[in-house]
Image: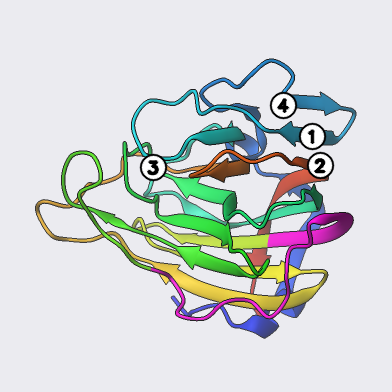
């Protein structure tokens, strides 16, 4: 499979009648959350500070939703699309989107991590044992030029994920219509590495430390697309 390049958005064509992505567009609250921390009104999700109700890991704050899962052997391209607005006085790092495989501990195959500057980096670990036994890594050595603002301004976030049917996938991220960063995930063939049995999307705010914030995600959807020139 060709690695997806920054100009690829212009070569994405929705089918004649755009198709919502089945299980990858069916969302539920992930692991529970504090009362009132996750709400939905019409097509807008709102996330607020919550203690982490999931077991395992070292992150203390989580208000996330998750999709149903697909198999790693699934093949197809999917576009996550939402208008997000973050309001906080903190510069705490947080994850805003993930592709997870159900592992306990270590970063999943993909995290969009918003660093203190507001730039996004693509984080991915290889899990080699229990707990935080992992090889830390990134899908790209660069960070985005664009930034996730923290003043409540709404921004258009798009994440294209193209699964190749072998458990690997390419991803490209756009912010306000401008291509920002791309990378490719390939599962490890090492015998001690965690082998995924499923993939699913997560969205919201996940952070190692607790901080006050409000994140809104308006019109969020995942659509199956086709890519090509």
Residue position marked by numbered label 4 in the rendering: 38
Decide whether the magenta segment is chiefly helix, strand or loop. loop
What residue is at 64 percent from the left and 41 percent from the top? 211
Residue position marked by numbered label 3 in the rendering: 101
Residue 198 lies in what quarter of the image?
Answer: top left
Q: CA distance from mark 1 to mark 3?
A: 23 Å
| Numbered mark located on residue 45 in the image | 1
- Mark toward the viewer: 4 or 1: 4
What residue is at 74 percent from the left and 41 percent from the top? 213
- Mark toward the viewer: 3 or 4: 4
Q: CA distance from mark 2 to mark 3?
A: 25 Å
What residue is at 46 percent from the left and 57 percent from the top? 110
Whether residue 122 sits left or right of residue 35 in the image: it is: left
| Numbered mark located on residue 216 in the image | 2
Near mark 1 (Cα within 10 A), the count class, few <14, some 14-19 or many ≥20, is some
Whether residue 79 sits left or right of residue 184 in the image: it is: right
Whether residue 221 sits left or right of residue 71 in the image: it is: right
Q: Are marks 3 and 4 in contact (CB under 8 Å)?
A: no
| Numbered mark located on residue 131 in the image | none
């Amino acid at each position: 499979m060709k690695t997806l390049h920054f100009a690829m958005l212009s070569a994405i064509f929705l089918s004649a009648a755009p198709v919502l992505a089945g299980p990858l567009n069916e969302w539920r609250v992930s692991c529970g959350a504090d009362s009132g921390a996750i709400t939905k009104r019409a097509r807008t999700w709102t996330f607020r500070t919550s203690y982490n109700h999931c077991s395992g890991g070292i992150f203390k704050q989580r208000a996330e939703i998750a999709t149903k899962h697909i198999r790693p052997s699934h093949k197809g391209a999917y576009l996550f699309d939402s208008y997000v607005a973050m309001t906080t006085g903190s510069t705490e790092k947080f994850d805003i989107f993930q592709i997870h495989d159900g592992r306990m501990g270590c970063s999943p195959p993909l995290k969009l991590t918003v660093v203190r500057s507001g730039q996004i980096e693509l984080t991915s670990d290889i899990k080699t044992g229990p707990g935080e036994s992992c090889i830390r890594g990134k899908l790209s050595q660069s960070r985005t030029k664009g930034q996730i603002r923290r003043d409540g301004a709404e921004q258009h976030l798009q994440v294209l994920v193209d699964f190749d049917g072998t458990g690997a996938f390419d991803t490209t991220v756009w912010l306000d219509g401008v291509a920002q960063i791309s990378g490719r995930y390939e599962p490890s063939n090492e015998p001690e590495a965690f082998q995924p049995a499923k993939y699913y999307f997560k969205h919201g705010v996940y952070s190692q430390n607790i901080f006050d914030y409000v994140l809104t995600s308006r019109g969020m959807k995942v659509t199956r697309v086709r890519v090509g020139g």
